[in-house]
Image (cartoon, rainbow, N blue to C red):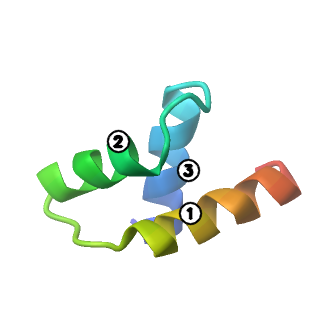
Amino acid sequence: MNLAYKIKDIFMKRNGVYGVPRIKIILNNKGVMVSKTKIDKIIKIFNCIQL
């Protein structure tokens, strides 16, 4: 699965409440290493285009 879709899935399952730090922790627990900056950029893209 694409990283952007993983982040979107986590963000949407939590009704947009989880922020970057919590999403990073969830991804790290799943074995996906990603920076907070990259997560933040992806969330901003999703909020702009309403996916």
The residue under the point 74% across, 65% down is 45
> What's the distance in space between the residues labelled 1 and 2, CA to CA?
12 Å
**In the figure, 22 relative to 33: above or below?**
above
> What's the distance in space between the residues labelled 3 and 1, CA to CA?
11 Å
In the image, which is nearer the foreground, mark 2 or mark 3? 2
Give the residue number, with chain letter if any, for mark 3.
Answer: 8
Task: Give SS at disc 3.
Answer: helix
The residue under the point 52% across, 66% down is 4
Q: Count every numbered label the image shows and give the total.
A: 3
Give the residue number, with chain letter if any, for mark 1.
Answer: 40
Contact? badges 3 and 1 (CB < 8 Å): no
- The foreground one among 32 and 5 is 32
- The foreground one among 49 and 2 is 49
Quadrant of residue 16 within the rendered picture: top right
Instruction: Give the image location of residue 11, x and y in percent.
Output: 53, 40
Give the residue number, with chain letter if any, for mark 2.
Answer: 22
Q: Three-letter amino acid code at disc 2?
A: Arg
Ranked by sequence position, the earlier of labels 3 and 1 is: 3
Instruction: Give the image location of residue 3, x and y in percent.
Output: 43, 68
> What's the distance in space between the residues labelled 2 and 3, CA to CA?
13 Å
Q: Three-letter amino acid code at disc 3?
A: Lys
Ranked by sequence position, the earlier of labels 1 and 2 is: 2
In the image, which is nearer the foreground, mark 3 or mark 1? 1
| Left or right: 6, with 26 as reference point | right
Graded by Cα atoms within 10 Å as few (under 14), some (14 to 19) or many (20 or more), the crowding at tag 1 reads: some
Q: Three-letter amino acid code at disc 1?
A: Asp
Task: Give SS at disc 2.
Answer: helix
| Quadrant including the N terminus | bottom left
Instruction: Give the image location of residue 38, x and y in percent.
Output: 49, 74
